[in-house]
Amino acid sequence: MARVTIDDHFCKGCGLCVDVCPTAILELDEAVITAKGYHPAHCIDQEKCTGCCSCATMCPDVAITVER
């Protein structure tokens, strides 16, 4: 089973990963603000992750790790 990990220290909340996720399991966390003032992305359902790595490939800040 695949697992998505997003490092809040690097995520600037651009939303590119949210747009590219084919299973729509990523979203920006409006309840969290990082030290840099961003709403980081987070995974809402790890069980549905297919491990396609589209999110990690799209991330300009290399904040996403996908483990298969």
Image (cartoon, grey):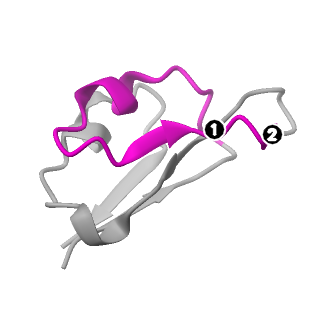
Name the residue rendered at 34%, 49% in the picture: 25
Name the residue type under label 1.
Pro
> Which residue is painted at 20% across and 46% down in the image?
23
Which residue is disc 2 drawn over? 34
User: Residue at point 12% right, 51% down?
Assistant: 52
In this rendered view, identify the residue nearer to me: 23 or 51: 23
Residue ranking furthest to the bottom: 1
Q: Is 13 one of the magenta-colored residues?
A: yes
Q: Secondary structure at mark 1?
A: loop
Q: Mark 2 belongs to which amino acid?
A: Thr
**Residue 32: quarter of image:** top right
Q: Nearer the viewer, residue 19 or 60?
A: 19
State whether the magenta stretch is mostly helix, strand or loop: loop
Which region is colored magenta? 10-33
Vertical relation: 51 (above or below) 30: below
- Mark 1, residue position: 40
Q: Is residue 56 magenta?
A: no
What is the x, y in percent for residue 15?
46, 23
Q: Secondary structure at mark 2?
A: loop
For the residues marked 2 and 1, what is the alpha-carbon distance in whole angstroms? 7 Å
Q: Earlier in the sequence, mark 2 or mark 1?
A: 2
Q: Are marks 2 and 1 in contact (CB under 8 Å)?
A: yes
